[in-house]
Amino acid sequence: MDRIVLKSFGKINLGLDVVRRRTDGYHEVRMIMQTVGLCDTLTMRKTKGEKISMKCDLSFLPTDRKNLVYQAIELMKERYHISSGVAVDLKKRIPVAAGMAGGSSNCAAAIKGMSQLFGLDLSIEEMCEIGVSLGADVPYCIWGKTALAEGIGEKLTRLSPMPDCWILIAKPGISVSTAFAYKNLKLDQLEKHPDIDGMIRDLENQDLDGICSKLENVLETVTIPKHPVIRDLKEHLLEHGAEGALMSGSGPTVFGIYKEKHTARRALESLRGIQDVKQAYVVRPV
Ligand code: ATP
């Protein structure tokens, strides 16, 4: 095999709790992760020579060692003594720096791609071990689907799949850095924590109403006061038929959950002309 095309899916968080701040600065989390049908495409091919070359359709993204895809290829070339060159072409659709783990997902796809392209036949565990050295969310992106992520995000438990529904994803035109959100979280002042265990039970029971009633993300206590557009967007989705709405990850992407496709589509239409929204899609859980 000389060339491989991979889909790299984004995620949302149905629940995001921070349990503890560690002395090394990392945060211990409990997050319910859900892959959604919005994906970037990664084309990888073997090339003559030894070099890694990378192209991306978003000119503002780095295509050198700062890109997680580049880092994954470099690390695997070294670890598995691969001398061949690798060219990679990345087409982005997942909003960037938006709380949807776009970079981590691309990194996970690159690890899988290298394994297949060079016949390494790596196990999920081995790929996760490589992934966690590049980012806490990378192991989850290797797993995909519905999962509980604990520790710094790398301790994973498979959960029952999300019941079928339609998810409207909307990214406002502001940026929130993950570091900013976690650094400014006042853990001791949180009035309540998300009911992660309750949501796990709702997933087992395929209870979409239960899931929608428990959507909660503690990082909203940081991002909403600073960027009220996040709250406005959630309210807009709820006023337009969403069963529940939440900010994903460290934001600023907001998602709404809908039972019917036409309601989700109408809500998508209602976002047209709202200048604050830069990217919006209707997708399903994967
Ligand atoms: P998370 O949800 O894991 O916090 P995110 O969705 O907020 O991630 P990303 O889209 O992964 O954020 O991008 C964060 C930063 O990472 C970008 O500003 C970008 O410079 C850098 N980056 C490195 N590699 C990639 C990549 N392949 N795709 C997107 N961003 C990348």
Image (spheres, rainbow, N blue to C red):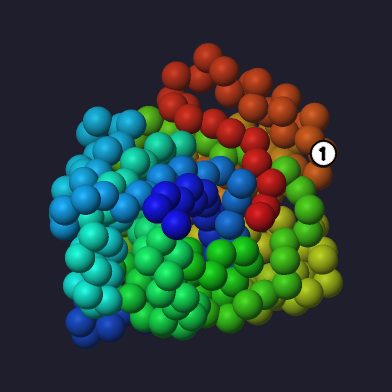
Q: Residue at x 58, y 34 (%)?
A: 281
Q: Residue furthest top?
A: 273
- In this rendering, the answer to whether 167 lies above or below 210 is above
Give coordinates of residue 105: x percent, y percent. Answer: 43, 57
Q: Quadrant of residue 261?
A: top right
Q: Classify the position of the C terminus by image quarter.
A: bottom right
**Where is residue 263 shown, x and y percent of the image?**
78, 32
Q: Is residue 91 above or below residue 21?
A: above
Residue 146 in percent (x, y) is at 63, 67
Residue 274 position, x and y percent, is 51, 19
Work out whether residue 75 can be spotted.
no
Q: Pick the residue in front: 164 or 41.
A: 41
Question: Disc 1 designates what residue?
Answer: 260
The reply, left or right, for residue 256 in relation to residue 178 is: right
Q: Quadrant of residue 158?
A: bottom right
Residue at 25% across, 44% down? 54
Is 39 or 99 nearer to us in this picture? 39
Q: Residues within 10 Å of mark 1 (few under 14, many from 20)?
A: some
Give whichever of 35, 272 is nearer the camera: 35
- Compared to residue 266, the image places residue 137 above or below, namely below
Kind of residue at badge 1: Glu
User: Image check: 18 left or right of 55?
Assistant: right
Q: Residue at x 64, y 21 (%)?
A: 270
Q: Is residue 93 visible?
A: yes
Number of numbered labels in the structure image: 1
Q: Is residue 148 left or right of residue 74?
A: right
Foreground of the two, 171 or 86: 86
